[in-house]
Image: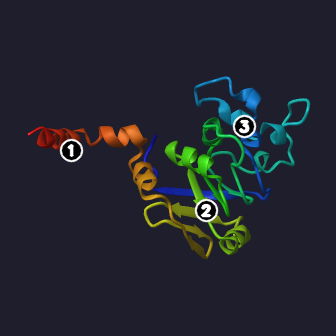
Amino acid sequence: MNPLTHITARATVLDIANIDTDQIIPARFLTTTTRIGLGKHAFNDWRYRADGSPDPNFVLNQGEAGDRVLLAGDNFGCGSSREHAPWALLDAGIRAVISTRIADIFRNNALKNGLLAIVVSPEQWASLHAQSGAAWVIDLRAETIQAGAVIVPFKIDAFARACLLEGVDELGYLLKRTDLIDRFEQGRAA
């Protein structure tokens, strides 16, 4: 995982409420334990027509590819717990999901895997939506989203934020502090 301090992108609006993890990555694609390649199946049943060709009307098939911010409808990531959902979004180039409500399990899985999951108020969401065509900058250190002239503050769990800023998962966070842990243990042994 690379350190995450800023995300600069344009937002893709997916204004659909109650997007569950099976819509993010359908269960039939959960046959792997690797993260690579899942992005092509993110929102598979919405992104592709019955013949397998991309549906040009689906928002993720429009515009430029690459790093994206997903401005999603209320209650994003609900449904069953599957770590494959944030993996698929990251592999599809999505670096942040913003919604008025994000399911707890999805949010925890996302943050642990390097996907920024941000909850904003309905009023803040509407302000961001109005700026969806503008360039956005998400500053994790300052915990702000700047979309055009609009600046929206947000809060991320302090430990998850520290891990994202350092570019480590929970184990990596501990391994970086092995010297401190060793000193603590030696002090306790005495």
Give the residue at x 59% y 59%.
118
Q: Assign a secondary structure to mark 1.
A: helix
Label 1 Cα crowd, 10 Å radius (few <14 / some 14-19 / many 20+): few
Dots 3 and 2: beta carbons under 8 Å? no
Which badge, 1 or 3, is on the more N-terminal residue?
Answer: 3
Q: Given the image, on which type of amino acid does mark 2 rest? A: Val
Q: Amino acid at mark 3?
A: Ile
Q: Which residue is mark 3?
A: 25
Per the rendering, the mark at residue 41 is none
Asked whether the beta carbons under mark 1 and mark 2 sit within 8 Å of each other, the answer is no
Q: Position of residue 12 (x, y in %)?
A: 71, 56
Residue found farthest to the right: 50
Q: Circle 1 is placed at which residue position?
A: 180
Callout 3 secondary element: loop
Which tag is nearer the camera, tag 1 or tag 3? 1
**Mark 3, other Cα within 10 Å: few <14 / some 14–19 / many ≥20:** many
Q: Residue at x 57, y 69 (%)?
A: 146
Alpha-carbon span between mark 1 and mark 2: 34 Å
Q: Residues within 10 Å of mark 2 (few under 14, many from 20)?
A: many
